Amino acid sequence: MTLLTQDVMVQANIDVNRMSAQQKVQLTDEIYVQQPNLLASILVLPRYGVDMQLLEEPIHVLLVAFQAMKHCGHALPTISEDVQETCLKRLTATLKFSEGVPPDLVEQMITKFCVDHPERYLLAFAYGHLGQHDLLRVRTDAEKYLLLACLNLVECVAYIGAK
């Protein structure tokens, strides 16, 4: 069941876009207290070659996701490193499954994955935001790690939210 509805995601994105830099820092401080592992999974990206300027995009996805959780009044338990690892394994297995599959079937698989996803609006937001910033084409290893971090964030919220 989807916790983060389309309306909640839209409002959260509007809220974050309207925030001052200081308000974003305050929201990041809240994330640090409540979801330190999610924040760390984004802040570690420069070690994997992600440019500091590009780091703004996964941070934005995290801020919007966290703001959406606040809007829906559902505080998730702290997402552990074990949960992150489990979700990353599932995500990479899903991606590897599509290797070598004809493009038309891959498109069907992606559509089914998105439609059936427990947090489809968060997933759609993440894909949309990254697509707007031309980060879905994965031209470099750094872009691959950035994409995986954002998608894993979505998977973790869905995994914990489903429990």
Image: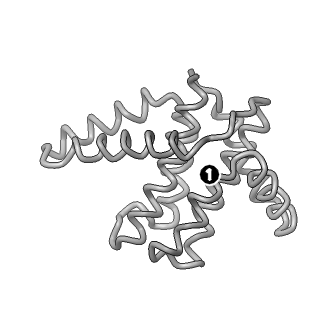
The percent coordinates of residue 37 (x first, y second) are 62, 51
The C terminus appears in which quarter of the rendering? top right
| Left-right relation of 122 to 116 | right
| Left-right relation of 17 to 120 | right
Q: Residues within 10 Å of mark 1 (few under 14, many from 20)?
A: many
- For badge 1, the amino acid type reads Leu
Of residue 41 and residue 50, the one placed in the foreground of this image is 41
The percent coordinates of residue 151 (x first, y second) are 47, 49
Q: Residue at x 37, y 39 (%)?
A: 90
Q: Is residue 145 above or below residue 85?
A: below
The percent coordinates of residue 99 (x first, y second) are 18, 48
Q: Is residue 130 above or below residue 55?
A: above
The percent coordinates of residue 38 (x first, y second) are 62, 51
State the count of labels. 1
Q: Is residue 55 above or below residue 123?
A: below
Q: Residue at x 56, y 67 (%)?
A: 44
Residue of label 1 = 38
